[in-house]
């Protein structure tokens, strides 16, 4: 669960990490009042759940309260498309007005789950304010990583390695060690999967200030962190995602034309990969899981086939815990309810497969039955392009 910058900064403030003086505004008038109270110049920052706001025009400088009012008026209600929003416009509903800082140096720091190394990576960069991927390409020597296990935490020598690497003056050196300890403990305790401070600013007074922060919690840890539920911005969640969550379905909207309904995350990923291999693009990730009900299957199919972007559907089920006949009944009930017109390629294998195929074949709906995985993907791609 990704949260807004202003929410993430509240966590940092609670940890004792310095953040810029700022106020949240939902109207241009509130932004002007904040600028008057904080003193100009101020930074006007769009609050959307995406990085890359600056390049998209979502972060602006105002040297007077009147300019703050104007910039806020221009941003509020506007849809921003960033390099990280997958082509989707995100509506600006809130503005964070912050006192501009006198910058001596910008650096980078993040904590992220590194699945390849099966540890947490602590990443420090001598240059901040640019995307870490860009820095890795242009100046990889400016990045240093230390890996650690959650149960051990970031060891003192690792924290010193990162801090020495950043080449900070002595007062900021001690502050950085303190920050690293607090951030790594928070990361583990709160089931965080990404914490990124970019930039972490060294001011003219040698103070370290977290100018921007990105905080993404692991959804799998929600049951351990019930207090985080209130932070989710439901205005940023699509109706399809809301419906999927209510039926405990794993759904992510994408940009393609082939709707996918699969059981199991591994098979779902393989299905999306093979669609792209044959020249198609998946419209979604949709894993119905193992303990799904017939009603939930029907709702999943309705999300899939009801998407105007979808030209063809591919259902790929390997029934183990979930039965093929249960899936078939859910699909047929939903297809009849919505008067299905789109072609649907179906591959069923596993528990009660004969019963499932019989239910689907007797439905007299636009279903195409294929036994082989590759053939099913090829046909779905072909149908989506015809």
Image (cartoon, helix red, strand yellow):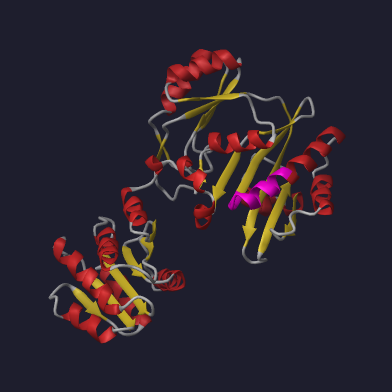
Nearest to the observer: residue 132 or residue 113: 113
Residue 218 at what x, y percent from top left?
54, 54
Residue 42 at what x, y percent from top left?
58, 21
Q: Horizontal placement of 260 versus 222: left or right? A: left
Q: Horizontal placement of 386 versus 223: left or right? A: left
Q: Is residue 183 magenta?
A: yes
Region in magenta: 182-194
Residue 330's image quarter?
bottom left
Q: Is residue 37 visible?
A: yes
Residue 138 at what x, y percent from top left?
68, 51
Q: Which quadrant is the C terminus positioned in?
A: bottom left
Q: Horizontal placement of 167 versus 59: left or right? A: right
In the image, residue 104 above or below residue 330 = above
Residue 89's image quarter?
top left
In the image, residue 69 above or below residue 6 = above
In the image, residue 317 above or below residue 228 = below
Residue 19 at what x, y percent from top left?
65, 31
Residue drawn where x is 71% and y is 51% of the image: 123
> Furthest-right residue in view?
170
Residue drawn where x is 31% and y is 48% of the image: 239
Q: Is residue 48 magenta?
A: no
In the image, residue 118 above or below residue 308 = below
Q: Is residue 83 visible?
A: no
Q: How many marks?
A: 0
Q: Horizontal placement of 301 versus 359: left or right? A: right
Residue drawn where x is 35% and y is 48% of the image: 238
Q: Main secondary structure of the magenta part?
A: helix
């Amino acid at each position: 669960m990704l949260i807004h910058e202003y929410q993430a900064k509240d966590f940092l403030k609670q940890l004792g990490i310095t953040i810029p003086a700022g106020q949240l505004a939902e109207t241009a008038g509130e932004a002007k009042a904040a600028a008057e109270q904080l003193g100009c110049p101020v930074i006007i920052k769009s609050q959307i759940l995406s990085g890359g706001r600056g390049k998209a025009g979502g972060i602006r400088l105002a040297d007077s309260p009147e300019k703050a009012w104007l910039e806020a008026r221009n941003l509020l209600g506007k849809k921003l498309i960033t390099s990280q929003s997958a082509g989707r416009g995100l509506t600006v509903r809130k503005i964070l007005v912050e006192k501009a800082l006198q910058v001596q140096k910008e650096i980078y720091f993040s904590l992220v789950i590194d699945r390849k190394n099966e540890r947490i990576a602590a990443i420090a960069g001598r240059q901040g304010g640019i995307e870490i991927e860009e820095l890795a390409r242009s100046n990889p020597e400016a990045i240093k990583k230390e890996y650690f296990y959650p149960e051990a935490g970031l060891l003192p020598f690792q924290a010193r390695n990162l801090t020495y690497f950043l080449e900070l003056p002595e007062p900021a050196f001690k502050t950085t060690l303190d920050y690293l300890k607090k951030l790594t403990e928070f990361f583990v305790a709160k089931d965080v999967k990404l914490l990124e401070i970019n930039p972490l600013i060294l001011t003219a007074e040698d103070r370290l200030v977290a100018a921007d922060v990105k905080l993404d919690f692991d959804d799998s840890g929600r049951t351990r962190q019930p207090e985080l539920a209130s932070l989710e911005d439901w205005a940023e969640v699509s109706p399809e995602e809301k419906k999927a969550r209510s039926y405990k379905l794993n759904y992510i909207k994408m940009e393609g034309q082939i709707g996918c309904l699969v059981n199991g995350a591994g098979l779902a990923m393989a299905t999306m990969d093979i669609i792209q291999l044959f020249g198609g693009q998946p419209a979604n990730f949709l894993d119905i899981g193992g303990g799904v009900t017939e009603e939930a299957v029907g709702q999943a199919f309705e999300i899939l086939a009801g998407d105007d972007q979808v030209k063809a559907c591919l259902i790929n089920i390997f029934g183990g815990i979930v039965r093929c006949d249960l899936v078939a009944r859910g699909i047929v009930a939903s297809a009849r309810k919505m008067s299905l017109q789109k072609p649907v390629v179906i591959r069923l294998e596993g528990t009660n497969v004969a019963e499932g195929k019989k239910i689907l074949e007797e439905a007299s709906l636009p279903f195409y039955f294929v036994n082989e995985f590759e053939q099913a993907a090829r046909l779905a791609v072909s149908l989506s392009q015809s």
